[in-house]
Image: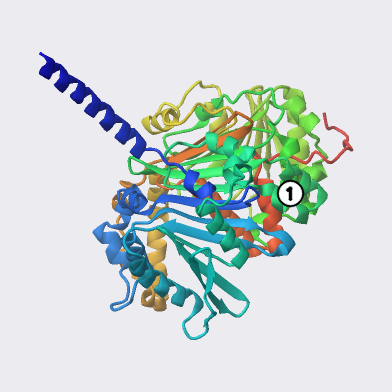
């Protein structure tokens, strides 16, 4: 009996140990890294387990698409071409790196100080054989100068220089550290060796960091943290105030069932709004809807993004479009108070692409509170947007329409605005606007009742401020059917294209779309900040990074900094300028 009882106790303890081990293996701790960094650290990125993240990536849907035979045939490299990136990754994998990080610890006097490191497996000599090759590739063997090694607290510090650049590196137990500043490297070594006794001087003790990390998932593949207030000194007063209101930005990426799951937390005061995100505009969608966005509106927070005098995005095509929009709204002299009196505090955007259509159509919708005010305001906006256009007005079934009389240009567009008791709907052609008006009286549609939309919505927290849905498979299928014939025809007339890419080997659409799940994003406000989550083969976060890069291509560094400052606020819908005070005749 006693032996049976003993076996029972041992069994219970074994089960508890297994459960603990499983849970512990699914959590990620950045304690080891943040204990190495100073409290004033500006930004850092943390990769807890490189090999585990790489294995998750190899199981992801987007990588499975990459490995499709037809995709590989299309992307096949020139015979004998070396893939140096793949070789470097394989070498890094041999080290079984843990807690890899790179941090910007200071930008005082416009001199950035960077430090990086990771824990490795195996011997130091094996690690140095690989790291030495990276160092040679980075600095150039013939151009780099190796200085006299320095001894510091029983560690040897190697110093390499190339022109104005310096890299100091050292091994500390199973850690490898490198920095572009010798003093910064010594400080990291001191923290790693436990010589820093003041725990309050470490990043792990910073309140804004701890609060932001508390909103992040316990398990992640990559984490990024930023204290944006550090950059505020170089901005104009209005942008400085906006950026200083942001306490911290924290983001993580992880893999869930083959999809990428991003979380972004921006610590900042909540925008004043009494509206509730209803997503009622989803009823305007159809079975051909590939994009749906719903958001609360906060005009006062977004005015800087559209103000033509702000200089944001200047020089890029996107920046020019934003500035033109800001000019239109300023010309219309519409204030936020006037807008709020006519419309509810929510906006929606839907884009459809029918099977037999060459191009997609899109509409924006705004719930109407006061029909008379909304109708007058729509007229002001229409005429201010294009003073040379001839706008026709008509009424049908209680709906007032504004539409440009004639279309021009390569794309046949006739901007149209419809105002009813329920909503104002804006589109680029009368047909799409009329169809949306007819659906606006419904409580649901083929889109909002569709399995894709319902499943995607259920995978996210119920949004309170922002929601987005993108049907990637539908979008790609429509792009393929429209562009494939044009590309093949273009290759026939421009034979040189075939020297760079074989368009006849573009993978069939069904091969691509089977790996493309929808992208969905949701935003809520909690614990002093906006938390935005996004899931998909790629996410809205990745799209946002591409957008910032696109803006940067057309502008200088100042424009990029200003854009980042404006985008630090939550992704609320674009709003009219609140700076104008005059009211033209006929404006409500």
On the rendered image, what quadrant is the N terminus found in? top left
SS class of the residue under badge 1? loop
Instruction: Look at mark 1 in the image and give the residue it sits on.
Output: 389
Identify the residue at image location x=36%, y=66%: 124
Picture quadrant of residue 121? bottom left
Picture quadrant of residue 582? top right
Question: Is residue 524 depicted above or below 213 in this figure?
Answer: above
Q: Where's residue 3, x and y in %?
A: 11, 19
On the rendered image, what quadrant is the C terminus found in? top right
Query: Is residue 355 visible from the viewing direction of this image?
Result: no
Question: Is residue 242 depicted above or below 295 in this figure?
Answer: below
Q: Residues within 10 Å of mark 1 (few under 14, many from 20)?
A: some
Query: Is residue 2 visible from the viewing direction of this image?
Result: yes
Q: Where's residue 46, x and y in %?
A: 48, 50
Most foreground residue, 73 or 363: 73
**Which residue is situated farthest in the top direction here?**
1
**Which residue is situated farthest in the bottom direction here?**
142
Most foreground residue, 569 or 319: 569
- Looking at the image, residue 91 sits to the left or right of residue 220; the answer is left
- Looking at the image, residue 465 sits to the left or right of residue 48; the answer is right
Most foreground residue, 417 or 60: 60
Q: Where's residue 451, x and y in %?
A: 37, 30
Q: Where's residue 500, x and y in %?
A: 39, 74
Identify the residue at image location x=54%, y=55%: 546
Identify the residue at image location x=55%, y=27%: 279
Identify the residue at image location x=30%, y=46%: 514
């Amino acid at each position: 009996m006693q032996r049976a009882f003993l076996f029972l106790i041992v069994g219970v303890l074994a089960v508890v140990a297994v459960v603990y081990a499983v849970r512990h293996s699914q959590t990620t701790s950045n304690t080891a890294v943040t204990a190495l960094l100073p409290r004033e650290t500006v930004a850092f990125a943390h990769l807890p387990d490189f090999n585990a993240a790489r294995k998750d990536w190899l199981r992801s849907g987007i990588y499975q698409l990459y490995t499709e035979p037809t995709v590989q045939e299309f992307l096949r490299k020139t015979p004998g071409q070396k893939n140096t990136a793949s070789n470097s990754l394989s070498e890094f994998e041999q080290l079984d790196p843990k807690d890899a990080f790179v941090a910007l610890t200071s930008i005082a006097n416009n001199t950035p100080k960077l430090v990086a490191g990771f824990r490795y497996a195996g011997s130091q000599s094996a690690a140095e054989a690989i790291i030495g090759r990276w160092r040679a590739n980075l600095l150039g063997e013939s151009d780099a100068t190796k200085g006299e090694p320095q001894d510091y607290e029983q560690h040897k510090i190697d110093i390499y220089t190339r022109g104005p650049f310096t890299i100091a590196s050292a091994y500390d137990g199973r850690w490898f550290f490198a920095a572009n500043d010798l003093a910064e490297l010594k400080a990291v070594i001191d923290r790693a060796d436990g010589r820093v006794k003041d725990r309050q001087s470490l990043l792990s003790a910073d309140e804004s960091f701890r609060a932001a990390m508390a909103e992040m998932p316990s398990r992640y593949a990559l984490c990024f943290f930023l204290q944006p207030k550090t950059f505020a000194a170089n901005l104009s007063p209005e942008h400085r105030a906006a950026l200083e209101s942001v306490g911290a930005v924290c983001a993580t990426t992880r893999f869930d069932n083959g999809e990428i799951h991003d979380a972004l937390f921006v610590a900042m005061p909540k925008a004043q709004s009494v509206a509730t995100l209803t997503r009622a505009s989803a009823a305007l969608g159809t079975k051909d809807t590939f994009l749906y966005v719903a958001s609360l509106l906060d005009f006062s927070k977004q005015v800087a993004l559209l103000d033509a005098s702000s200089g944001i995005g200047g020089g890029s095509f996107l920046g020019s479009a934003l500035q033109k929009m800001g000019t239109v709204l300023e010309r219309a002299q519409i204030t936020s108070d006037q807008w709020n009196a006519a419309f509810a505090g929510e906006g929606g955007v839907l884009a459809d692409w029918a099977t037999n259509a060459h191009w997609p159509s899109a509409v924006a919708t705004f719930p109407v509170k006061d029909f008379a005010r909304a109708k007058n305001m729509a007229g002001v906006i229409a005429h201010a947007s294009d003073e040379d256009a001839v706008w026709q007005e008509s009424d049908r079934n209680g709906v007032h329409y504004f539409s440009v009389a004639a279309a021009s240009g390569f794309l046949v567009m006739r901007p149209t605005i419809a105002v009813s008791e329920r909503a104002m709907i804006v589109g680029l052609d009368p047909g799409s606007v009329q169809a949306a008006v007819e659906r606006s009286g419904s409580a649901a549609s083929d889109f909002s009742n569709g399995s894709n939309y319902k499943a995607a919505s259920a995978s996210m927290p119920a949004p309170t401020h922002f929601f987005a849905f993108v049907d990637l498979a539908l979008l790609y299928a429509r792009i393929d059917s429209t562009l494939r014939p044009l590309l093949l025809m273009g290759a026939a007339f421009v034979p040189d294209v075939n020297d760079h890419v074989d368009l006849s080997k573009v993978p069939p659409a069904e091969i691509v779309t089977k790996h493309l799940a929808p992208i969905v994003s949701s935003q809520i406000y909690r614990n002093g900040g906006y938390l935005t989550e996004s899931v998909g083969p790629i996410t809205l976060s990745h799209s946002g990074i591409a957008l910032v890069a696109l803006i940067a291509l057309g502008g200088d560094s100042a424009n990029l900094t200003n854009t980042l400052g404006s985008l630090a606020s939550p992704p609320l819908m674009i709003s009219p300028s609140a700076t104008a005070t005059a009211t033209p005749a006929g404006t409500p």
